[in-house]
């Protein structure tokens, strides 16, 4: 028997759970469909800014009672092959380290939505009533794609994930250190480390959250990713900053940067949010804040209309552009800076406290210049 809902949300990550919670609180009957069962492992460096916690109405102290919540006060930043610069951002946390397996489960649990976990996307078809039917089991007038870079809903309405877009490919590992490893590890919990590749095509990170350590590297050219990661890890081990023995398997994932994404965001009765829409910040690759904000903006557009045609949902795409700016792929003209010039300037800048603190950290990674999202509620 087919089950009827007001909205089907494909993907239970931060974007999907935020959408589910926002709509459910407004009286919509929603269903979150995810191929995995929560809590599930999720590859992600894992940190959230106070702006994210504010819009999600999460108290850090309350969350920390049952979950990892690592306050961040400093950053250690450098270009590979150079000495790092360490900057202190004050007594108040400027960000928090979280474990995505815990964070995503927490958000989904509190969403209040019905859930179909462990259910793979198999088919999406139009019914005679003009609604959508997922897997021949779940029906609704609206489908929201929130399944990340490889979201099947994104593939359904476009040419397919990554078909003509430049994606960042990353490999990382997160593990709990032994007491001996924890004692020897020189990386401090309140001070994540960011190391930029000399060709400016990506960066690596080492991030400690209590006894958990996350190590990874992401690049826009995936061909040399394995070699770059291997060199970085060996260098960190040689300096004694990370344990010599690491789990052998680094997990890979991919995401689209907002400036480079060319995906359609809407169709009749369909919306894409979060990484499925390609909204990760261009400089840092962070996707959690854009994911959550896109879900809230989409929910407000949904609430404002009973017409789910592409034309009626267009205000969502307009709000995204207003919030995140015009994409580089949409811009015409302008002065292109040669790559050699960028690299020549970057090396000395990465040695300065002003650039690493005011630009790299506060602007690129913390987005302190971006005000908290204003909502209709």
Image (spheres, rainbow, N blue to C red):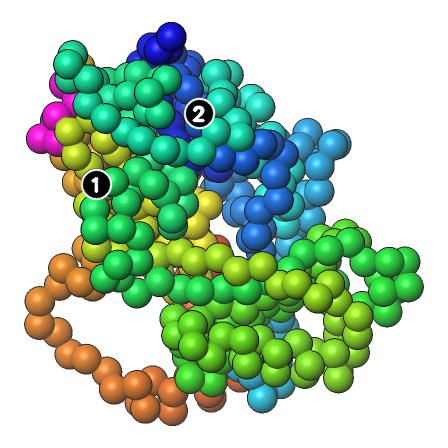
Quarter of the image where the C terminus is located = top left
Residue 375 pos. (x, y %): 33, 28
Please name the residue that numbered disc 2 is placed on: 32
Up-down relation of residue 154 to residue 22 (above or below): below
Taking the image as drawn, is residue 24 in sight? yes
The structure residue drawn at horizontal position 35% and vertical position 11%, both measured from the top left corner, is 2
**Earlier along the polypeptide chain: callout 1 or callout 2?**
2
The structure residue drawn at horizontal position 71% and vertical position 37%, both measured from the top left corner, is 67
Taking the image as drawn, is residue 315 in sight? no
- In the orientation shown, which residue stands out farthest toward the right? 180
The structure residue drawn at horizontal position 39% and vertical position 33%, both measured from the top left corner, is 121
Please name the residue that numbered disc 1 is placed on: 157
Up-down relation of residue 314 to residue 256 (above or below): above
The structure residue drawn at horizontal position 73% and vertical position 55%, both measured from the top left corner, is 175
Camera-nearest residue between 208 and 375: 208
Residue 233 pos. (x, y %): 66, 76
Residue 51 pos. (x, y %): 48, 42
Give, as a single range, the part of the protein colored magenta. Answer: 307-312
Camera-nearest residue between 178 and 89: 178
Up-down relation of residue 119 to residue 29 (above or below): below
- In the displayed structure, does residue 180 sit left or right of residue 231? right
Q: Residues within 10 Å of mark 1 (few under 14, many from 20)?
A: some
């Amino acid at each position: 028997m087919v089950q009827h809902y007001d909205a089907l949300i494909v993907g239970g990550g931060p974007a999907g759970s935020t959408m589910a919670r926002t709509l459910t609180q407004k009286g919509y009957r929603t269903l979150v469909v995810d191929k995995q069962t929560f809590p599930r492992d999720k590859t992600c460096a894992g940190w959230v800014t106070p702006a994210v916690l504010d819009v999600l109405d999460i108290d850090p102290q309350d969350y920390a009672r049952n979950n990892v919540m690592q306050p961040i006060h400093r950053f250690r930043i450098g270009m590979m092959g150079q000495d790092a610069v360490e900057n202190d951002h004050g007594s108040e946390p400027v960000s928090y380290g979280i474990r995505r397996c815990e964070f995503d489960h927490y958000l989904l649990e509190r969403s209040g939505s019905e859930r179909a976990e462990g259910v793979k996307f198999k088919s999406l078809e139009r019914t005679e009533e003009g609604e959508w039917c997922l897997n021949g089991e779940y029906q609704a007038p609206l489908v929201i794609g929130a399944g990340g870079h490889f979201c099947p809903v994104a593939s359904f309405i476009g040419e397919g994930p990554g078909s003509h877009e430049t994606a960042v490919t990353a490999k990382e590992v997160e593990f709990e250190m032994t007491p001996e490893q924890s004692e020897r590890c020189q990386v401090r919990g309140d001070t994540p480390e960011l190391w930029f590749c000399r060709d400016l095509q990506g960066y690596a990170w080492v991030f400690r959250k209590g006894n958990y350590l996350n190590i990874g590297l992401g690049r826009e050219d995936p061909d040399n990713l394995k070699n770059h990661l291997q060199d970085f890890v060996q260098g960190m081990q040689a300096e004694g900053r990370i344990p010599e023995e690491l789990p052998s398997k680094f997990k890979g994932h991919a995401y689209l940067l907002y400036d480079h994404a060319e995906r359609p965001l809407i169709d009749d009765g369909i919306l894409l949010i979060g990484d499925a829409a390609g909204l990760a910040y261009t400089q840092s690759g962070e996707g959690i804040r854009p994911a959550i904000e896109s879900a809230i903006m989409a929910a407000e557009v949904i609430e404002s209309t009973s017409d789910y045609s592409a034309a009626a949902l267009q205000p969502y795409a307009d709000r995204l552009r207003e919030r995140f700016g015009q994409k580089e792929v949409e811009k015409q003209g302008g002065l292109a800076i040669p790559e050699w010039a960028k690299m020549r300037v970057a090396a000395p800048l990465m040695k300065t406290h002003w650039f690493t603190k005011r630009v790299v950290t506060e602007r690129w990674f913390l987005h302190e210049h971006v005000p908290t999202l204003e909502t209709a509620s």
